[in-house]
Image: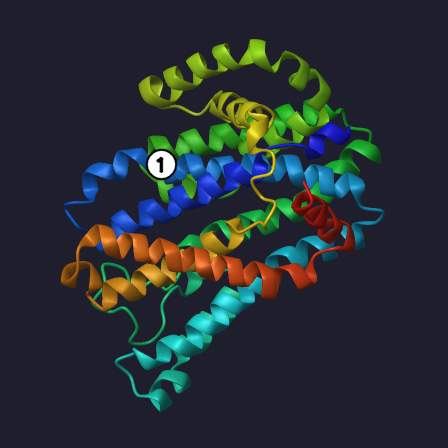
């Protein structure tokens, strides 16, 4: 199973992260010149791709952990440090652009609701800070964080899933099929009543995560037959996603497309040798775009130059975050693997 570790997941996650960042740039700036590009940046597919990759890698992480405690600590150390930094830094630094005085800002109940909600991964309860981004299209400080609570839920569901299989002796594939069917049924029902906001939450997103787990458990078989499976998957995906607009087989077909790219194109294997900047790109881009919109920079200067500047600053923050915030909390084995990548 050593070849499991030789993959292009770092490349895929960067693509997914920048797809979300580009889409938010277009949406939040609300510039007509950028809107024609929106069709090229599908945030839903990018997020689904994250969930598929997460299912694969988290199943691997769980099986490689000696105890559940070790597994949970590893996951917490990977997510929490940078997440808390972006929440706390936003809360403090944006006080300087708030329409409220510093005293009113920090004594406002909304400020404390923001901290409580966001630090507990419940961004939806209070996404805004007092007097911040009131003239923007949305006042949300970091609208990208809604998926983090889903990731946390997935992390906690994995031990339950394995417990049902290992201890309660439930058949792995029966359990996966049941979870998958419930997930796609939930998603399609709420989508049919025009409630995408609910459809995209749990358990609607669970089918993609479960697909990633199945692909990990069947890695050798899928890897052997991947060149024969990819064409049927592409056809079915295009048919369902663009014609039928359903999600019955999409987690499987899109999941295999992600798997195929991850284990083909060997020249991309070392893409993450200098670090995994994906998480930083994902959590830092939204407040940075909101700040640029608030300052009116998209209207004062050429939009494409400002877009490039936003993305470069986002990448810079992600790099700094990786080396100074995220890496110190990685497990010893993860740091060693990163060092080996650098020597290739």
**Display colour scheme:** rainbow
Q: Residues within 10 Å of mark 1 (few under 14, many from 20)?
A: some
Residue 177 image point, x, y percent: 62, 23
**221 or 312: which is nearer to us?**
312
- Residue 1, picture quadrant: top right
Task: State whether residue 231 is above or below residue 7.
Answer: above
Q: Is residue 302 left or right of residue 25?
A: left
Horizontal and vertical percent position of residue 222: 65, 18
Left/right of residue 18 with respect to residue 49 in the rendered view = left
Q: Residue furthest bottom?
A: 103
- The correct choice, above or below, for 56 with respect to 317 in the image is above
Position in image of residue 125 (x %, y %): 43, 62
Residue beneath the point at 51% across and 41% down: 13
Residue 309 drawn above or below residue 231:
below
> Where residue 342 appears, x then y in whole percent?
66, 47
Q: Nearer the viewer, residue 253 or 34?
A: 34
Is residue 100 shown to the viewer in this render? Answer: yes
Quarter of the C terminus within the rendering: top right
Quarter of image, res 219: top right
Q: In this image, 59 relative to 297: left or right?
A: right
Residue at 73%, 26% in the rendered image: 172
- Can you tell which quarter of the image residue 217 is in? top right
* Residue holding disc 1: 42
Count of numbered marks? 1
Residue positioned 46% across, 52% down in the render = 282
Viewer-side residue, 102 vs 297: 297
Q: Is residue 160 visible?
A: no
SS of the residue at dot 1? loop
């Amino acid at each position: 199973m050593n070849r499991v570790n030789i993959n292009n997941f770092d490349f895929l996650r960067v693509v997914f992260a920048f797809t979300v960042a580009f889409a938010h740039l277009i949406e939040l700036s609300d510039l007509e010149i950028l809107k024609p590009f929106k069709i090229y940046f599908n945030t839903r597919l990018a997020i689904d791709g994250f969930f598929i990759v997460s299912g694969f890698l988290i199943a691997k992480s769980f099986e490689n952990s000696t105890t559940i405690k070790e597994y949970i600590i590893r996951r917490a150390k990977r997510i929490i440090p940078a997440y808390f930094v972006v929440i706390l830094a936003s809360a403090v630094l944006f006080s300087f652009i708030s329409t409220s005085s510093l005293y009113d800002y920090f004594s406002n109940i909304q400020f404390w609701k923001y901290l409580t909600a966001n630090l507990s991964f419940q961004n939806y309860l209070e996404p805004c800070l007092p007097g911040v981004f009131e003239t923007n299209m949305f006042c949300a400080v970091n609208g990208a964080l809604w998926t983090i609570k889903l990731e946390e839920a997935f992390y906690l569901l994995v031990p339950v899933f394995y417990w049902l299989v290992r201890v309660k002796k439930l058949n792995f594939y029966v359990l996966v099929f049941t979870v998958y069917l419930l997930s796609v049924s939930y998603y399609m029902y709420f989508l049919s009543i025009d409630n995408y906001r609910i459809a995209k939450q749990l358990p609607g997103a669970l089918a993609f995560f479960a697909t990633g787990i199945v692909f990990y458990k069947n890695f050798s078989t899928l890897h052997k037959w991947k060149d024969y499976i990819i064409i049927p998957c592409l056809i079915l995906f295009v048919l369902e996603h663009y014609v039928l607009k359903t999600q019955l087989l999409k987690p499987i077909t899109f999941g295999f497309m992600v798997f195929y790219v991850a284990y083909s194109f060997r020249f991309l294997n070392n893409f993450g040798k200098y670090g995994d900047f994906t998480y930083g790109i994902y959590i830092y881009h939204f407040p940075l775009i909101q700040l640029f919109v608030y300052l009116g920079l998209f209207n004062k200067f050429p939009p494409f130059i400002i877009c490039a500047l936003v993305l470069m600053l986002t990448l810079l923050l992600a790099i700094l975050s990786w080396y100074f915030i995220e890496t110190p909390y990685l497990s010893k084995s993860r740091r060693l693997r990163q060092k080996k990548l650098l020597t290739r």
